[in-house]
Image (cartoon, rainbow, N blue to C red):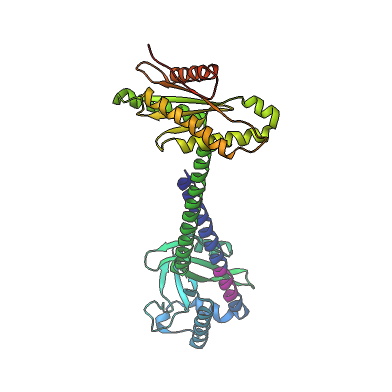
Amino acid sequence: MIAVFLSLSGYFLYDSIRDLIVYELGNNAVNIAFTAAKFIEQDIDPFIALAEVEDYDLQEYDTDYYNRMQSLFRELKKNTGATFIFAEKKLSDSEIVYLIDGEDPQDELFSPIGTVDSMGEFELRVFKECITGATDIVNWEFWGMFVTGYAPIVDRSKDEVVGVVGVDFSFEYIENLLNRIRQLIIFTFLLIALLGTYILNRLVIDRSTALSIDYLTGLHSKRYHDARLNSLIRKSRFSGKPLSLMIIDVDSFKEINDEFGHNVGDETLKVAARKIKLYTRSTDICSRVGGDEFAIILPETDLERARLVGERIVERFKRDLSSTKKDGGPKITLSIGVAQWREGMSARDLNQLADVAMYRAKSKGRNGVFAHQHR
């Protein structure tokens, strides 16, 4: 989705930049054409005489004026970077005749005076409507792709268009710039896509972690416990291997909170969680499933082995805390219930059996383990 969105955004951005460049290039071409047309209009008579010649092969025109204007157009082309600069007259609604050309006479693209060429649609409007303007990119069959600006040459005494100045900028003039812009857009949007994907991935991971990890103890959450227990039950159903569940409760936790405060209660849960994690295998799944209640899923472990693990936890917990217990601090003990999954049992059934076993451990004096035996 990010890639599609950025691709569309990049396309529209590039298209807008391209249109803007073509527009500005057209404006530049029009300004040059308008300047040249106004210069010609300051001394219009020689140009009119040049335009009225019928047979240019006979050279019956003012060659000094022609050569001077040729030189001027070449200089203008050089200084502006235009591809072509020319002045023309209309032969018909479909043809023009070149009068002045800014090319070197030795160049193969030079159009000698009297050369006939086809008339463009916008070009004809300039002759008929006396307007200035520029084309979009036009692909001429012989000349190539150009943006062309046009300005009319007007005989003010008759208010008549006697010729047109055209200024061409080749599409190649902007193609390199557009290529660089295209590469920059692709690189930028690719970077944004990668960065966006990374950020979204981190958000998904963080969100998943937040849902899977208990914020206080660092053990797995009840949500994670339920999902993993269901998954391991399905696995045991197909493999036939045993699966046991242990429910652990911190004894007299309400009294600890009431006597020592909730901060001490929170620290008690953290200590219990650290010890539980320390005393179990890396394959065991330790979770906090309630306020002061923990669960341990023991894959490939039968009831007897699970009971021994529970007794080891109780004993090591008692030993470790007695050696580090501060005077006046709470006495922390654990009651543990153990149950083994049997065919036909759901995750809820197994949780309930282990929970009942834990309460049996409490009823027997707390600080101990009770294993639910199947009849």
On the image, the x and y values in percent for residue 242 come to 34, 24
Q: Which quadrant does the C terminus fall into?
A: top left
On the image, the x and y values in percent for residue 130 come to 58, 64
In the image, residue 161 sits, relative to residue 314, either above or below, namely: below
Task: Inspect this view and state whether residue 213 appears.
Answer: no
In the image, residue 293 sits, relative to residue 100, either above or below, namely: above
Q: Is 163 covered by the magenta stretch?
A: no
On the image, the x and y values in percent for residue 340 come to 39, 21
In the image, residue 149 sits, relative to residue 265, either above or below, namely: below
Q: Residue at x 39, y 17 (%)?
A: 345
In the image, residue 346 sits, relative to residue 89, either above or below, namely: above
Q: 369 and 119: which one is in front?
A: 369
Task: Inspect this view and state whether residue 21 appears.
Answer: yes
Magenta span main SS: helix
The image quadrant of residue 129 is bottom right
Q: Residue at x 61, y 24 (%)?
A: 252
Q: 246 and 288: which one is in front?
A: 246
